[in-house]
Image (tube, grey):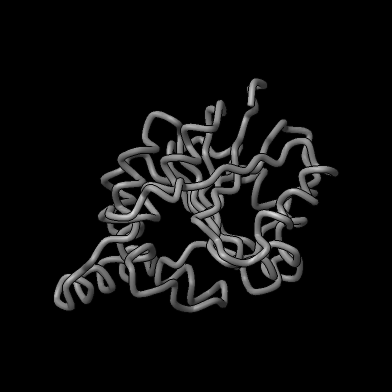
Amino acid sequence: MTETTDISIVLVVHDQAGLLRENLPSFLNIDTKRPYDVIVVDDQSTDDTPDVLKLLKADHPHLYSTFLPTSVIYNPSRLRLALTVGVKASKSRRIVFADISRPFNSESLSGLANSEGPITMVYTGRKPEKSSIIFQAFDSLDEATNLILKAERRSGFGHRRRFFKYRRGIYTALSVDKGLVFPVINLFDQRISGFRLWALRFSVFFHNLF
C-alpha cells in the first residue's frame, strides 16, 4: 500500500467467509468523497476466506488484506496482534476499528471522519439505513477507556439495538487518531473480573444516561 488516505477501516476475521460475502461490500461501497481504504486481517482462517478476499480485491482497489503468520501461536491476545498488523499496514491519519458482523454505512463513516474528538464511537441499529445514528466523541483516552474495556472484553458484544447499545456502550465502530491507536488496541480483548465488569457496566450506563 503506497497511497495515503484519510481513513482506514480495519477488520479482523477468522473463518467468516459467509459474513465477508454478505457484509464486506457495504464497507467497500460507501458513498463518500473522502479517500479511504479497507484493511482485512485474516487470522489464519481455514475456510475460503482468502478466496473471497481475492475475488473482492479484483473489483475494489481500495481493499487490502494481510494475515497473521502461522508461526504465531502463543500470544496474550491474537486480536490485539491482528489489529496491530492492520494498523501498521495503514498510512491513514484516522483508523476505524469495525467488525464484519456489525452494520455500517456512509453516514457512519462520514461522522467518524469529521469528528473533532481524537476518539469517536458510532452506534447504529441492526439496520442502520432505517435507524438514527448516535455519535459519541471523547477528548481523551481516559474518558473512553471504560467504554472500550467494557465493549471489547472477551465475553462478547452484548445488545444489538441502537438504544441499548448506546446506553450500555456497545458501539458499532470506533474511530481513533493515529497517535492514540496503540494505547486503544491495548484495551481490546481483556480478561475482566466479575466485580470489575459490574463496576464498568454501572460506570458506562450512568455516563451515557446523563
| Rendered view: 96 above or below 157 | above
Residue found at x 63% / y 29%? 6
Q: Viewed as shown, does residue 119 lie left or right of 163?
A: left
Q: Viewed as shown, does residue 174 lie left or right of 76?
A: right
Q: Viewed as shown, does residue 107 lie left or right of 47?
A: right
Q: Using the image as rendered, state which of residue 75 and residue 63 is in the foreground.
A: 75
Residue 143 at x, y = what percent?
A: 30, 48
Q: Disc count in the image?
A: 0
| Rendered view: 16 above or below 82 | below
Which corner quadrant holds the C terminus? bottom left
| Rendered view: 114 above or below 142 | above
Residue 157 at x, y = what percent?
A: 44, 72
Which corner quadrant holds the N terminus? top right
Do we see residue 145 in this rendering? yes
Residue 38's image quarter?
top right
**Which residue is situated farthest in the right direction here?**
59
Residue found at x 60% / y 48%? 40
Residue 59's image quarter?
top right
Residue found at x 81% / y 45%? 31
Q: Using the image as rendered, state which of residue 136 and residue 34 is in the foreground.
A: 34
Do we see residue 122 in this rendering? no
Residue 43 at x, y = what percent?
A: 49, 55
Residue 114 at x, y = what percent?
A: 60, 37
Residue found at x 55% / y 59%? 13
